[in-house]
Structures are given as C-alpha cells and as structure tokens.
C-alpha cells in the first residue's frame, strides 16, 4: 500500500522512516567520531565533508518526510493507550520532526559562519557535486559558536529521543503486544 491507512503506514512513510533512522544513527556516530577521536587534520577535513554531504541528504529526506506526512495523516494510535501516553507520543514525534530539520540546518549554518571557510576558501560541497549557498560572507566566530551550540544540543536531544522512541516501540511490541512496531515494518 502506498498511502497510510487508519491501521497502517504506507510504503513511502516506512521507507522514509527507516532510511532516516539509519542515516541519523550514522550521522550521530560520525559526528561524535570525527569531533572527538580524529586528530589528523586531513582525515578530519574529509570526514567533515562527508558529514556535510550526508547532512544535506538528511535535510532533503526530512523535507520529503514532512511533506508526505502532511498529505498522509498518521494511522490511529493503538487502542488502549492512555491519554498521557498519547500526549507523550505526539510530543515525542513532534520533537523528532523539529530536530530532523534543526540538526542539518544548524550544521550548514555553523559551517557557513566559520571564518576558516572564508580564510581558506572552503566550500560547503555535497559529495563534490554542487555547492550549498553561503549566507554568511564573511563568517563570524560568534555566529559559528551559536550554531555549533544548537547543533551539539540538538544531537544530544536527538540521541535521547531516539532512545525513548525505540524503548516505546519495543514496549508496544513486547509488553503491550499491540502491533505498533509491526505497522512500521510491514504496514499492517
């Protein structure tokens, strides 16, 4: 099924969900690795360029996912969920949607604001194919720090929300046995 139904997620929603899940986990791991464990400046540069490129892909998928969600209402939540559970589920999903936009935007703006970019002529390239626009010419250290802080705090929040999201899905599957996780895997 292509479109969401009252009881299940359509194929595009499921593909976007799992593709973004894998990409976000990869990006969080890559970001932590390149920022904390790589000392070689040339290797770090290559990893940052890779991170920027996949960040662009993450943003593009986020836009697609949001547009698809706007034209495809979510299936009903499982019966038996309490009001507080429904409120937390909706708030958690909203926070995830906000973060899938804020993280790549803050990363792009942080890179664009970097004074190193202007000094060394570094461009925000996507897989070496095209350049992202640079809204800050010249860049500024204060702006770079602001967006770096937003990017870092967003990564922390995203990590926490992913843990809660996965725990809730497993609770639905293993404890409540209401088929919630199955709907995101097979659509029914």
Image (cartoon, rainbow, N blue to C red):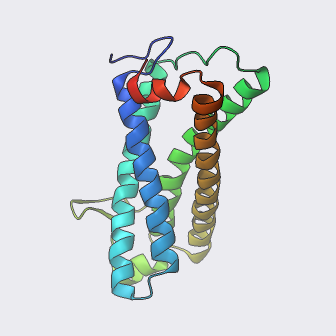
Q: Position of residue 124 (x, y in %)?
A: 35, 66
Is 168 placed left or right of 56 in the picture?
Answer: right
* Camera sees residue 60: yes
Q: Residue at x 61, y 17 (%)?
A: 78
Q: Is residue 94 above or below residue 60?
A: above
186 sits to left or right of 178: left
Which residue is farthest top?
6
Image vertical order of residue 40 relative to residue 19, above or below: below
* Residue furthest out toward the right: 84
Q: Position of residue 158 (x, y in %)?
A: 59, 52
Residue 182 or residue 108, whichever sits in front = 182
Residue 186, by quadrant, is top left
The count of marks equals 0
Quarter where residue 164 is shown: top right
Q: Can residue 113 be seen?
A: no
Please state the horizontal and vertical placement of residue 48, each as a whole percent of the image: 39, 71
Judging depth in this view, the residue of 62 and 169 nearest the camera is: 169
């Amino acid at each position: 099924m292509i479109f969401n139904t009252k009881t299940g997620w359509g194929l595009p929603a499921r593909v976007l969900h799992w593709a973004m899940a894998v990409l976000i986990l990869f990006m969080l791991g890559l970001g932590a690795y390149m920022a904390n464990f790589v000392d070689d400046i040339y290797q770090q540069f290559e990893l940052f360029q890779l991170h920027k490129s996949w960040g662009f892909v993450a943003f593009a998928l986020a836009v697609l996912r949001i547009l698809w969600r706007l034209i495809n209402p979510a299936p009903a939540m499982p019966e038996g969920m309490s009001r507080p559970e429904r409120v937390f589920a909706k708030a958690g999903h909203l926070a995830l949607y906000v973060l899938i936009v804020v993280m790549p935007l803050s990363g792009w703006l942080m890179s664009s604001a970097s004074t190193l970019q202007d000094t060394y002529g570094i461009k925000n390239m996507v897989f070496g194919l095209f350049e992202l626009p640079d809204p800050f010419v010249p860049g500024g250290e204060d702006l770079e720090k602001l967006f770096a802080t937003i990017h870092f705090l967003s990564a922390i929040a995203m990590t926490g929300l992913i843990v809660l999201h996965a725990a809730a899905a497993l609770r639905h599957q293993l404890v409540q046995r209401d088929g919630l996780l199955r709907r995101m895997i097979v659509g029914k």
